[in-house]
Amino acid sequence: MATMDSLIGLMNRIQRACTVLGDFGGGTGGNGGLPTLWESLPSIAVVGGQSSGKSSVLESVVGRDFLPRGSGIVTRRPLVLQLQQTQKGEADYAEFLHLPNRKFTDFNLVRKEIQDETDRITGKTKQISPVPIHLSIYSPNVVNLTLIDLPGLTKVAVEGQPDSIVEDIEDMVRSYVDKPNSVILAISPANQDIATSDAIKLAREVDPTGERTFGVLTKLDLMDQGTNALDVLEGRAYRLLHPWVGIVNRSQADINRNVDMILARKKEREYFQYSPDYSHLASRMGSEYLAKLLSQHLESVIKAQIPSITSTINKSIEELDKELDSLGRPVAVDPGAKLYTILELCRLVDRIFKEHLDGGRPGGDRIYGVFDKNLPTALSKLPFDKHLSIQNVKKVVSEADGYQPHLIAPEQGYRRLIESALSYFRGPAEKTVDAIHFILKELVRMSIGECQELKRFPTLQSELAAACYEALERYKEDSKKTTLRLVDMEATYLTVEFFRKLPQEGEIRPGGDGKRGSNAPPEPQLVDRYGEGHYRTIASNVKAYIAMVSDTLRDTIPKAVVHCQVREAKRSLLTNFYNRVANRATNDLGEMLDEDPSLMGRRQELAQRLELYQKAREEINSAFTR
Ligand code: GDP
Ligand code: MG
């Protein structure tokens, strides 16, 4: 079983660690929703009105001069004072948490450092800040104790202070005494009516039963001649569960005369021993007694608190573990592990992308939609009617004939009409390629977005996306070339068979509407080779040929597009990226795995706090199993 001394030491260590991690009271600590251990740590908070003697009481308890004192608001940041008893004969020294490795043996310098450190956060204004200063004092003459000196409660803002200061101070003080593990050292000056004591007022509010309030009455020496504070000290004026302790601190005159603490304590002892009013209470009065009383009490509070602290720790560890899991664990530092992480993430994205294409995730069906709807619609909307109007046919055929009109079928005229009609197919071919490109790009974007694990690496994410888009761009160019080539091929060699099968002109009714396969048997007649009917027939034949080509392209364009774009994307979307990664210097790999700074910060915060809790748990466990 641990000794109580070591338990207070343990609490002190946890408390210091809490401050380093920004886990402290004061509300504005910016805890970021992290679990807090601070809340469950027992401590003794000193509260009271301005100049009620708070800092003086602390100094008396410590037995050293080290606190800035004076009129007005001197204490503007909480001071967490951890007293640690050392072996007899060892010299006193002090240490600040913000100045590790520096031992202060001159307590005047401690005072100066408290002032400077206060100003460092609040500026030389009269502002206050909830960020605590941690001071540890090691001495054979102290009892193990943790006390928190707080700004004095005040009634009005003075020059240079914001109007909100009165409330701000009260809020800050309240945040320290609110928590159920806080012991309240309520300081009231004896030369003021206890009914008007700010300390008692606040204590009563947060601790109505009084079980964690210790009433301290200062300035007994300043009471009017002929009056005494027995009513208060004996618990008649205001009842508390714990007995009141009267204190006589040094007066301002004593301080100015540099009356040292040893002498001050001696004078205080003598004051009570020889006071006609208080001699019967002498053994329960004075700062030395107060120090022992508080130490004992703090020990019992810690002892009672250990189970709940342990359970807070366990619960917090669980929460932190969970959030860390969801953020992703830190990436290993060695290049091999980095490369592995990058490739794993790429594979993941690739897999998601394939699921989009092959089914399982949505999107692939949109490609079929383009082939099944958009392409046929675009083909059907091509302006062949206009191109094959009688006037245009006549114009093209005549131009092709030159000075000598054609004798039988206008071979050149047909060719020109067909060639120029075929060029219309370039549009839908290109549009189809673009549409598929757009869909593939969208699927890449979705796949990257859906890869949760990739979210923490914005650099990798954008480099990966860029490489994929680049690859898609190449497939698109290739696909365009191929589909346009399909169209061009149709123009360079016409299907002879089609024309051979055409009925001879003589078989077509004069003035026929160009529709072949009509039920009425064609009446052989002589055709006017330069009449309207003749051109209509030409137009109709060309239209039929174009329709045949259109059917073919409706089938072959999708084949080309799938071959050049979809299949390639499935096969080698990331090939380029892999090559790039392979050629990278190892330190560049780290750059690729740069994380969102806010995320890294959060993870670090969580990890540090987790470490704190794990250490605390270990310490508590070993303290109780020793
Ligand atoms: P704080 O503002 O509550 O921290 O009060 P301080 O400890 O700074 O004390 C304010 C003033 O009251 C100082 O000048 C002290 O010397 C003086 N003082 C505090 N306690 C006593 C006391 O018990 N007797 C006398 N005579 N003066 C005291
Ligand atoms: Mg003070």
Image (cartoon, helix red, strand yellow):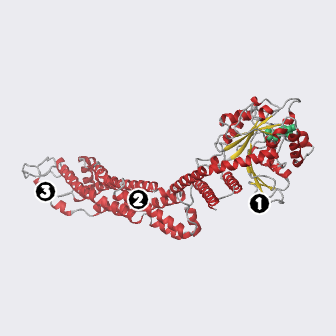
Q: Mark 1 and 3 residues: CB-CB less than 8 Å, in contact? A: no
Q: Earlier in the sequence, mark 3 or mark 2?
A: 2
Q: Which mark is residue 101?
A: 1
Place of residue 164 in the rendered image (x, y in percent of width and height, measured from the top left): 71, 33
Q: Is residue 296 left or right of residue 139?
A: left
Q: Image quadrant for the C terminus?
A: bottom right
Hey, which quadrant is residue 163 in on the image?
A: top right
Element carrying mark 3: loop
What residue is at 40 percent from the left and 54 percent from the top? 438
Q: Looking at numbered disc 2 in the image, what kind of residue is underneath it?
A: Ile
Element carrying mark 1: loop
Place of residue 104 in the rendered image (x, y in percent of width and height, measured from the top left): 82, 56
Q: Which mark is residue 503?
A: 3
Q: Of 306 and 251, which appears nearest the observer?
A: 306
Q: Which mark is residue 154?
A: none
Hey, which quadrant is residue 407 in on the image?
A: bottom left
What residue is at 80 percent from the left and 30 percent from the top? 192
Hey, which quadrant is residue 99 in on the image?
A: bottom right
- Vertical side of 482 occupied by 295: above or below: above
In space, the residues marked 3 and 2 are separated at their CA atoms by 56 Å
In space, the residues marked 1 and 3 are separated at their CA atoms by 107 Å
Q: Mark 3 and 2 residues: CB-CB less than 8 Å, in contact? A: no
What residue is at 42 percent from the left and 60 percent from the top? 472
Q: Looking at numbered disc 3 in the image, what kind of residue is underneath it?
A: Pro
- Vertical side of 403 occupied by 189: above or below: above
Q: Which mark is residue 352?
A: 2
Place of residue 140 in the rendered image (x, y in percent of width and height, measured from the top left): 81, 56
